[in-house]
Image (tube, rainbow, N blue to C red):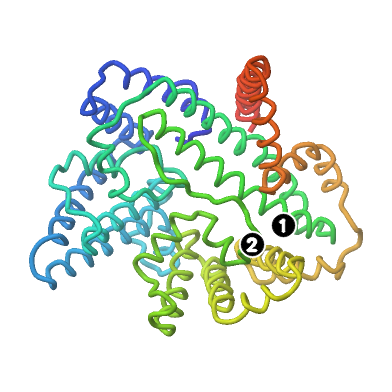
């Protein structure tokens, strides 16, 4: 089940909200969250819930072990948690690796858990790891840990929620009318990002990067559309996850920072899926001023693991290394050089670096990447743009322009400031803005629902 599925929007979500209001106690809300999350996580595959409960018990025990006793026992507990959760992720998500290695006994005909397991596994590691590093105390109430581990709010694309950030909220929280208003608004906006803008960019990407009719314009615009598609799908699902937390009385950390080219590639890396990057930095990266060699090794290892976490394949391994090397080079000397040059040079460098990095993630085969790269400069192409690419771009031109505006923080922030300034001038203006906002949210929901039906 996905947040964008109609059964989730018009069935699962309203029922969970209604059930959570039947009792004000936090204990009751936690029970409802666990039960509904079990349905969400195992939708269509009810036997998997047995696996989930068993691994939660182990992480609970590993957490106790990482928090008490001698150093070797604490280290052993941490190591066991990493092995168990990493194995869970590989076996049940990237299961095709065993077929490639010839280990048929561990090969499934299809993925048993098509989503969720990546974020589920990393939560187990982060909890035990934070206990091991003494950032938090081990949780003695296994039910509280169960609420954290199995919550469906951040199952699809995150965010990476650390136990220490929400442990107090698990024990005490309330749901207000403001929670409902803010949560529903943000959920619909996130849904619109995925089903309207994300889908529009995907159509343009598919047309432009069609290997049977590559053209120079298609190669450039198609890859830019791929970046836009990834941006709106990830940020859209994250918006929905944060909204689900708000609807249930939680407040999670933001997972995406506005795109800022002034921070160069390092800023983009830290701002996109921010909490995932912070997770690997916390456990693997030594501060640059403390030890340069260990800093470099930590960044490289983090890049490799993040790349493989996104996709268990060679191109994602290169993708992770590529961005890790750029972060290291910027830290060593490139940032100081770029700071002295006109800003436009730094902006162009960042855009080009992200453009090339995205292409590495997109093309699984080297020959396809090389064909695309040559097409950028018109090599081995017959036309400037294909008919299909032209038609798709014109069909989604309006959404393309809106998407570009939303991706540029300066323009988006200016529009927000102007609207806020207008609404504060009088009660009439405020009422008009509120009515317009509500009407806009309703329109977005209708449009996103229509898009879900046609997909």
Q: Nearer the viewer, residue 8 or 43?
A: 8
Above or below, 336 relative to 1: below
Residue on which disc 1 sits: 223
Residue 148 position within the rendered picture, expressed as x and y whole percent measured from the top left:
28, 42
Residue at the image point whose x is 36% and y is 35% from the top: 250
Residue at the image point whose x is 76% and y is 49% from the top: 207
Residue at the image point whose x is 63% and y is 57% from the top: 260
Dots 1, 2 in contact, CB < 8 A: yes
Residue furthest bottom as drawn? 293
Residue on which disc 2 sits: 358
Left or right for 249, reference 345: left
Q: Label 1 neighbourhood size at 10 Å, few (<14), some (14-19), many (20+)?
A: many
Q: Nearer the viewer, residue 109 or 369?
A: 369
Q: Secondary structure at mark 2?
A: helix
Residue at the image point whose x is 68% and y is 19% from the top: 429
Left or right for 230, reference 124: right
Indicate the quadrant where residue 31 lies: top left
């Amino acid at each position: 089940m996905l947040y964008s599925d109609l059964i989730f929007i018009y069935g699962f979500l309203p029922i969970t909200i209604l059930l959570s209001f039947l009792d004000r106690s936090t204990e009751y809300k936690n029970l409802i969250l666990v039960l509904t999350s079990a349905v969400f996580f195992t939708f269509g595959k009810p036997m998997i819930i047995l696996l989930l409960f068993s691994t939660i018990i182990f992480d609970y025990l590993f957490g106790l072990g990482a928090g008490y006793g001698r150093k070797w026992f604490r280290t052993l507990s941490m190591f066991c948690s990493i092995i168990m959760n990493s194995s869970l992720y590989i076996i049940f998500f990237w299961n095709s690796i065993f077929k490639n290695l010839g280990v048929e006994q561990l090969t499934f005909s299809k993925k048993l858990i098509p989503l969720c397991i990546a974020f589920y596994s990393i939560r187990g590691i982060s909890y035990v790891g934070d206990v091991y590093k003494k950032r938090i105390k081990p949780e003695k109430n296994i039910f509280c840990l169960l609420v954290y581990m199995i919550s469906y709010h951040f199952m699809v694309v995150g965010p990476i929620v650390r136990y220490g950030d929400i442990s107090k909220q698990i024990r005490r929280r309330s749901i207000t009318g403001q929670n409902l208003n803010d949560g529903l608004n943000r959920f619909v906006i996130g849904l619109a990002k995925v089903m309207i803008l994300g889908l529009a960019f995907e159509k343009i990407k598919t047309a432009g990067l069609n290997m049977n009719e590559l053209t120079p314009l298609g190669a450039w615009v198609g890859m830019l559309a791929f970046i836009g598609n990834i941006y709106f799908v990830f940020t859209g699902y994250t918006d929905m996850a944060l909204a689900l937390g708000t609807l249930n009385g939680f407040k999670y950390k933001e997972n995406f920072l506005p795109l800022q080219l002034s921070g160069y590639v390092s800023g983009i890396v830290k701002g996109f899926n921010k909490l995932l990057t912070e997770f690997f930095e916390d456990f693997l990266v030594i501060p640059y001023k403390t030890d340069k060699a260990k800093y470099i090794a930590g960044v490289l290892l983090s890049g490799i693991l993040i790349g493989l976490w996104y996709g268990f394949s060679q191109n994602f391994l290169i993708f992770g290394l590529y961005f890790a090397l750029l972060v290291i080079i910027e830290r060593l000397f490139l940032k100081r050089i770029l700071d002295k040059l006109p800003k436009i040079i730094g902006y162009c460098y960042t855009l080009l670096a992200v453009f090339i990095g995205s292409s590495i993630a997109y093309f699984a085969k080297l020959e396809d990447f090389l064909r695309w790269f040559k097409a950028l400069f018109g090599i081995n192409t017959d036309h400037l743009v294909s008919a299909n690419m032209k038609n798709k771009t014109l069909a989604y031109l309006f959404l393309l322009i809106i998407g570009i505006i939303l991706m540029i923080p300066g323009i988006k922030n200016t529009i927000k400031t102007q609207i806020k300034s207008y609404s504060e001038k009088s009660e009439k203006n405020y009422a008009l803005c509120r009515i317009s906002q509500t009407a806009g949210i309703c329109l977005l929901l209708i449009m996103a629902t229509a898009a879900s039906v046609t997909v």
